[in-house]
Amino acid sequence: MKYRHSTAQSADYLRLALKRMSQQDAGLHPASYTIWYEYVAGTNPELKAAVDAQIERDGRLNEATTYALYARHVADFDAKTALRIGDSVNHIVEQISESATTAGEQASRFGGSLESWTDALHLPGGSGSLASGVEDILRGTREMQEAISTLQIRLEESRREAQQLRQEVARAREEALIDALTGLTNRKGFDLALDACLKEATREAQGPCLLMIDLDHFKRLNDTLGHVFGDQVLTSVGQILRANVKGKDTATRYGGEEFAVILPQTPRGGAIGLAEALRALVFASRVRRSGDKEALIGNISVSIGVADYIAGESATEFVSRADRALYMAKAQGRNRVVLAPRPQSAGVQ
Ligand SMILES: Nc1nc2c(ncn2[C@@H]2O[C@H](COP(=O)(O)OP(=O)(O)OP(=O)(O)O)[C@@H](O)[C@H]2O)c(=O)[nH]1
């Protein structure tokens, strides 16, 4: 986004932002500075509300929260603004284009009338000098028609350019939500999808459910077979998820060797069934090292935590419950699926 503050005003904001930044647990880097600059300048109301909520909850912003707020409210805000501007440009060009078409039609009608008048004035008994005057006007009208049609062509070009720019922004935005290694949604895409899902959740009879999936003993695999092979394993698990998680469901590379699946409108039985199927598919898969004929000795496995949503629960609580179930699965021996217990106060559905 563009900041249009005067030098004196931005210096004031800088002082205020630095004061706020130094009170947080996060580093003094550009992401942190942008957040606090926008906060004190009041340029991004949604960001301000999110920061206030976070401070009320935790007292300070730590490193992870700072980057999460930056990703959601600054990077995403810019992309949304660009799309909105693209839409407005399109709209304006379309309106001008319509006006030019109307003007062209009117000029053409006027030209037609002038032509019939000149014909009438050239008839025996008509006025020759008046006819030549009308012919002058007719010439002028034709020039005007030509100018209008040139304008229409230019407007059509501008409309196409605006449309192209809009598509580029939309594509860049989509790419920003995709993990490059696996092609799955990335953490930012996950946050957006989970937000949208939880907004719908109150209207749904059942679900949503969330799976948190973590590769077992991945450090050992990396250490013995190398990071490049580790990346191949991550890609292969990504493919299994992509092939088996479809429709309204979202599969994400949550970070490192952890994946997540959001399952809107899904009862817990269905979520456990899918989790079990994914676990079995990963366990049955054989990943070959590029150039190696030998299949990997030993199976790759995942542990999965499943949480079914409790009405009113925040996204963070929902993810934490699934995460806790995942660590229970690890503690119980790995390569298994564990359902997150519901707090007693939440009751049983
Ligand atoms: N190859 C590769 N390794 C990664 C990537 N992201 C995280 N890792 C590695 O994943 C490993 C995760 O190790 P730990 O968190 O100790 O977990 P673990 O070895 O899987 O053990 P458990 O989860 O307890 O079964 C670390 O060695 C990370 O370096 C990545 O993108 N590529």
Image (cartoon, grey):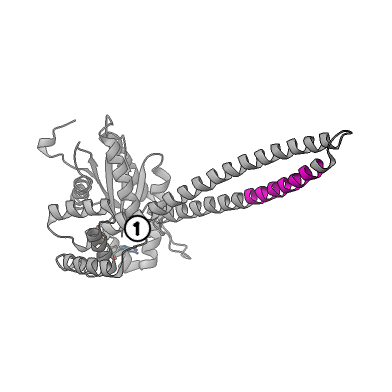
Q: Is residue 247 magenta?
A: no
Between 200 and 37, the one lying in front of the other is 37
Q: Which residue ends up furthest to the left in the rendered image?
A: 345
Q: Is residue 132 magenta?
A: yes
Residue placed at 30% from the left, 70% from the top? 7
Q: Quadrant where the C terminus lies?
A: top left
Residue placed at 38% from the left, 43% from the top? 245
Residue 289 falls left or right of residue 54: right
Task: Evaluate whether residue 279 shows in this view.
Answer: no
Between 345 and 85, the one lying in front of the other is 85
Give the magenta part as a residue range.
131-153
Residue placed at 58% from the left, 45% from the top? 97
Badge 1 crowding class, 10 Å Cα cut-off, few under 14, some 14 to 19, many 20 or more, is some
Q: Quadrant where the N terminus lies?
A: bottom left
The image quarter in which residue 197 lies: top left
Task: Report which residue position mark 1 lands on.
Answer: 75
- Label count reads 1
Residue placed at 52% from the left, 52% from the top? 162
Residue 296 rendering spot, x and y as whole percentages: 39, 60
Label the magenta part by its dominant secondary structure: helix
Tell me the amino acid under the disc marked 1: Ala
Q: Which residue ends up furthest to the right in the rendered image?
A: 124
Residue 215 rendering spot, x and y as whole percentages: 30, 55
Residue 185 rendering spot, x and y as whole percentages: 37, 51
The image quarter in which residue 176 lies: bottom left
Residue 60 rendering spot, x and y as whole percentages: 14, 60
